[in-house]
Image: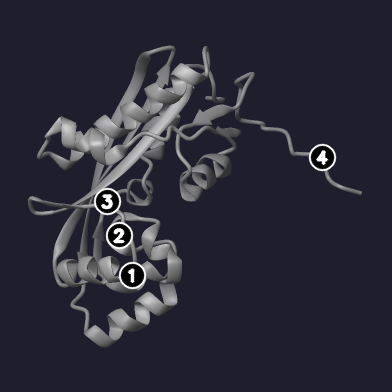
C-alpha cells in the first residue's frame, strides 16, 4: 500500500512556504529542514534586472534579484509567504552567470582556476508587496590549478549540470574536485542562507522554537 505523507512536526504554518525558485537544491534544503514547499517560478528576466540596476557590488545584485523574485511571486499568491533567492559569483570585479554550454563552462573554469572567488547568496521573504526579511551571505572559495586534461574530464563527469550553477560547478557533486580551500557557510555556498531564514521563520511562529 502507498504510504501517506509524513506529518511536518516542526512546521507550524497552515500552508506550505512558497519558493520562488526552480532550484532543486534550494527546495531540497528546505524540505530536509521539515518545511513543506510549493514552487512558483517568477519567470523574471534576471539579466535585464541586473543591467537596469547597474550595481557593481555582487552582493547587492544577488539581494536585488532575490527581492525581485519574492515580490513578483507574492503578487501572484496573495496572503502567502514567499521566499526568493539568488546567487552571484565574483572574481575581483568580474561577475559570472550560469554558463550557457560546456564551452562557456570551460572558459569560466579556466578563469577561476588557481584563484579565490566569492559566492554571494541572498534570500528574501515577501508577502503582499512587502519584503519582511532579507539576508546576504558570502563565502570564499579557492580553486586549485586545473590542467586542460582535467577540465576535459571534469566537464565529461559533470555533464549537463555545469549549466545549473554559476561557475559551472556544484560542490555537493563532482564540483568538489575543483577546490583546495573553502571558507564560509555550507548553505550559503549551496545558494540559500538557510540558518538566518530558519531564525526568521521561528520569530514569525511558523517553526517550532
The percent position of residue 186, horizontal first and vertical second, equals: 36, 51
Instruction: Give 179 or 37, whichever is nearer the viewer.
Output: 37
Q: Which mark is residue 173?
A: none
Q: Which mark is residue 184?
A: 3
Q: Are marks 1 and 4 in contact (CB under 8 Å)?
A: no
Residue marked by disc 1: 102
Instruction: Give 104 or 79, whichever is nearer the viewer.
Output: 104
Residue marked by disc 4: 4
Q: Secondary structure at mark 2?
A: loop
Q: Quadrant of residue 180?
A: bottom left
Residue marked by disc 2: 99
The percent position of residue 178, horizontal first and vertical second, equals: 29, 72
C-alpha gap between disc 1 and disc 4 = 42 Å
- Asked whether residue 137 appears in the rendered view, the answer is yes
Q: Is residue 3 left or right of residue 26?
A: right
Residue at point 29%, 79% (across, down): 151
N-terminal of the pair, mark 2 or mark 4, is 4
Q: Nearer the viewer, mark 2 or mark 3?
A: 2
C-alpha gap between disc 2 and disc 3 = 23 Å
Q: Secondary structure at mark 3?
A: loop
C-alpha gap between disc 2 and disc 4 = 40 Å
N-terminal of the pair, mark 2 or mark 3, is 2
Q: Are marks 1 and 2 in contact (CB under 8 Å)?
A: yes
Amino acid at each position: 500500500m502507498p504510504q501517506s505523507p509524513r506529518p511536518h512536526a516542526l512546521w507550524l504554518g497552515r500552508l506550505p512556504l512558497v519558493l520562488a525558485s526552480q532550484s532543486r537544491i534550494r527546495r531540497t534544503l528546505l524540505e530536509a529542514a521539515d518545511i513543506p514547499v510549493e514552487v512558483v517560478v517568477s519567470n523574471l528576466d534576471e539579466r535585464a534586472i541586473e543591467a537596469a540596476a547597474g550595481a557593481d557590488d555582487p552582493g547587492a545584485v544577488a539581494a536585488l534579484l532575490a527581492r525581485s523574485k519574492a515580490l513578483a511571486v507574492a503578487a501572484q499568491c496573495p496572503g502567502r509567504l514567499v521566499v526568493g533567492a539568488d546567487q552571484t559569483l565574483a572574481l575581483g570585479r568580474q561577475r559570472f552567470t550560469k554558463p550557457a554550454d560546456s564551452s562557456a563552462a570551460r572558459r569560466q573554469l579556466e578563469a577561476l582556476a588557481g584563484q579565490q572567488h566569492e559566492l554571494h547568496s541572498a534570500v528574501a521573504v515577501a508577502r503582499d508587496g512587502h519584503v519582511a526579511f532579507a539576508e546576504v551571505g558570502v563565502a570564499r572559495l579557492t580553486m586549485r590549478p586545473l590542467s586542460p586534461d582535467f577540465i576535459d574530464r571534469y566537464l565529461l563527469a559533470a555533464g549537463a549540470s555545469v549549466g545549473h550553477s554559476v561557475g559551472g560547478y556544484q560542490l555537493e557533486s563532482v564540483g568538489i574536485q575543483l577546490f583546495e580551500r573553502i571558507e564560509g557557510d555550507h548553505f550559503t555556498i549551496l545558494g540559500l542562507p538557510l540558518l538566518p531564514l530558519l531564525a526568521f521563520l521561528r520569530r514569525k511562529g511558523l517553526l517550532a522554537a
